[in-house]
């Protein structure tokens, strides 16, 4: 079977694709805990792009950039049946950016090409600063997981050019490759 036929079969067999979104930002999380209004441009942009592509957003939360919060969010979204779990932010190179390291330890399989393509496309837009864009992706149980930088331009690039065009195909493959539990 050709790749194109396989991809078309995959897209046809997948119904609704459900996204869970986590915006990883300790400062925004703390502001919310204090009762302050927090603007979440990237999270709201992600919802808009996902819905306009015909997919469903089942949850969106702002969480702190901590290993515990990220693991808890990943498990919660997977257990709730999210097909794609999107983490926005916490991907920088400072000491307190732990999203990438945390998720990569949890992945069943890594999707190497996502980060490579993200950086390639980002390089075309922002130049050599793209080398510090630590986007990553993988699978966790039955879900596909993506971690992208928190800027609105990064959200738009990742979702419009990479994730939503392949969402049904990725979901099809992640469901087929998920570990079976006895």
Image: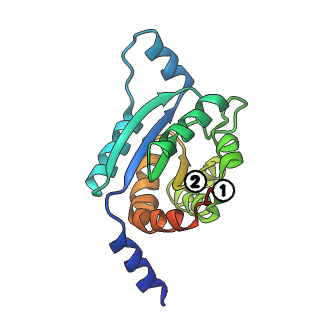
Vertical relation: 66 (above or below) 91: above
The structure residue drawn at horizontal position 66% and vertical position 34%, both measured from the top left corner, is 97
Residue 115 higher or lower than 71, as above or below: below
Q: Which residue is mark 2?
A: 141
Q: Secondary structure at mark 2?
A: loop
Q: Residue at x 53, y 68 (%)?
A: 176
Estimate the x, y position of residue 82 in percent, counting from the top left: 44, 48
Other residues around mark 1 within 10 Å, as few (<14) / some (14–19) / many (≥20): some
* Residue positioned 39% across, 12% down in the render: 36
Label disc, if present, on residue 108 of the rendered structure: 1
Can you name the residue that lies furthest to the bottom here? 1
Q: Residues within 10 Å of mark 2 (few under 14, many from 20)?
A: many
Q: Measure the alpha-carbon separation of dots 1 and 2.
A: 7 Å
Q: Considering the numbered disc 1 on the image, is that residue within a helix, a strand or a loop?
A: loop
Please give the name of the residue rendered at 59% of the width and 29% of the height, measured from the top-left corner.
69
- Please identify the quarter of the rendering in which residue 94 is found: top right
**x%, y% of residue 77?**
48, 41
Dots 1 and 2: beta carbons under 8 Å?
Answer: yes
Tell me if 171 is positioned left or right of 74 in this view. left
User: Which of the two labelled residues, at mark 1 and mark 2, occupies the earlier sequence position?
Assistant: 1
Tell me where residue 15 appears, x and y as whole percent: 32, 63
- Left or right of 164? Residue 115 is right
């Amino acid at each position: 079977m050709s790749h194109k036929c396989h991809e078309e079969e995959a897209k046809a067999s997948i119904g609704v694709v459900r996204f869970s979104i986590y915006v990883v930002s300790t400062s925004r999380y703390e502001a919310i805990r204090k009762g302050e209004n927090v603007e979440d441009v990237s999270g709201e942009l992600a919802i808009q792009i996902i819905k306009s592509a015909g997919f469903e957003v089942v949850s969106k939360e702002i969480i702190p950039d901590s290993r515990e919060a990220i693991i808890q969010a990943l498990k919660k979204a997977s257990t709730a049946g999210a097909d794609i779990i999107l983490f926005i932010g916490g991907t920088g190179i400072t000491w307190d950016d732990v999203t990438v390291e945390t998720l990569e330890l949890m992945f069943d399989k890594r999707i190497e090409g996502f980060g490579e393509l993200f950086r390639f496309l980002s390089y075309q837009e922002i130049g050599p600063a793209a080398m510090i864009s630590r986007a990553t992706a993988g699978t966790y149980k039955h879900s596909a997981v993506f971690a992208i930088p928190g800027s609105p331009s990064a959200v738009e690039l990742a979702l419009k050019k990479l994730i939503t065009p392949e969402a049904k195909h990725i979901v099809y493959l992640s469901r087929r490759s998920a570990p079976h539990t006895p």
